[in-house]
Image: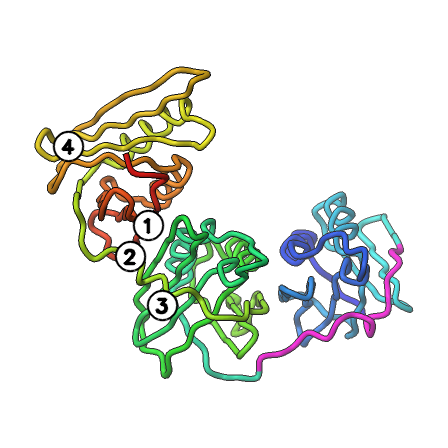
Amino acid sequence: MKVEILKENLKGGLTVVERVIGKNLSLPILDNTLLNTEDSFLSFISTNLETTIKLWVLTKVVRKGNVLVPAKFLSSFISSLPNEKITIEAKEQNLYVECGGLKTNIRGFNPQEYPIIPEFKQEEYIQLDNQKFCQGLLGVIDIAIPSSSRPEISGIYFSFFNKNLKMAATDSFRLGEKNITLDQPVKKEFSFILPQRAAWEIMGILDNKEGLVKIYFSNNQVLFEFPLKEAQHPQVQITSRLIEGEYPNYQDIIPSKFKTQAVIKRDEFLNQIKTASLFSSKTNEVKISINPEGGTAGIFAKSPDIGESKSSMPVKAEGEPIEVSFNYKYLVEGLTNIKSSEVTFEVSKEEGPCVLRPVGDASYLYVVMPIKSI
């Protein structure tokens, strides 16, 4: 293999694929990345056996071939080189790098020892706007929680039906759900659970990219693909194993009727909760009270070691007066995920779930359980 490539393209490819690489004591071969030539492309492949990233860069291929080299070391080394054209050449499993007057030799490994990367042979896929997809995923991604006893809540639930994509996540104390309308209806309904770690990698790679993302899936894997702008070819593919099992029937916990409903200015509500949190107890408790008749919301927190905080703000509310305590962290995260200027705060009953929704956007909801009734 011999390739001539710009430093920024080589470094950019390595930066993406090294995301899934960590110090693997049991399988040190996974600390490497596989460089391979394909037509006029140099491809980069890395995997941790759960998530695989493959990225292509258009370049000048002098001689075809492949090489397996330590990913993080190569990335750090390339970063130290000047912004010039780089020639990389594979000879007897080693990688020779030439840039300007610098010539180096990096010890590589046998590419045959690298895990076989499964390929998706299915031609059917779902396609949607990447920015809508990433913004929707961002609204639920941090809610999932690692769980060995309930692995299904360790991931993000995806459900495709008709012209709708539904993404949801829960940790048993709170729930986020985002709905995205697809341009075309799906041929058949399907769903899967994506591991949270893989979801973060997808966000880190695809966030802010403009274009369409394709989603392919099989019984135990899913593939997210984003295209190159300059050619009819993928730029990057992220493949992940799926979490086995049935996702909880979370729809049953979303209330359909509410005892109290209030429309609150999001930024002021969020700031007052953050202020009150400085005075919260070890349980992170903050009390929210709604007075529909007076048109006010109160935020209260008390700590025996620090003191107490009490504040109020105007709201538009209807229903019954209510006081409920929440873990302030859950409220802060829910309000942070909502981008509208106003939120709807709905309480079903003192011991029941509370629902936060952005005003003017019916596609997102955030459910949080109270700590206790007051």
Query: In which quadrant is the C terminus drawn?
Result: top left
Could you tell me which secondary element the residue under label 2 belongs to? loop
Q: Position of residue 19 (x, y in %)?
A: 64, 54
Name the residue carrying label 1.
Answer: 367
Q: Disc 4 residue type?
A: Asn
Disc 3 + disc 4, Cβ < 8 Å: no
Residue type at the position of mark 1: Val
Label 2 vs 1, first from the N-terminus: 2
Residue occupying the far left of the picture? 293
Residue 165: image tag: 3
* In front: label 2 or label 3: 2
Q: Judging from the image, what secondary structure is the residue with disc 3 in? A: strand
Q: Secondary structure at mark 4?
A: strand
Nearest to N terminus: mark 1 or mark 3:
3
Query: Looking at the rendering, which quadrant does residue 110 occupy?
Result: bottom right
Residue at numbered disc 2 = 254
Q: Principal SS element in the magenta part? A: loop
Report the Cα–Cα distance between label 2 and label 1: 7 Å
Residue at horizontal 78 percent and vertical 59 percent from the top: 87
Foreground: disc 1 or disc 3: 1
Magenta segment, which residues?
A: 105-120
Q: How is the image coloured?
A: rainbow
Tell whether 289 sits left or right of 140: left
Where does the image place residue 167, in percent across and percent down from the top left? 39, 62
* Residue at 37 percent of width and 22 percent of height: 302
- The span from disc 1 to disc 3 (Cα, nearest Å) is 19 Å
Could you tell me which residue is drawn at 35 percent across and 25 percent down?
Answer: 301
Q: Amino acid at mark 2?
A: Ile
Location of mark 4 (residue):
291
Discs 3/4, front: 4
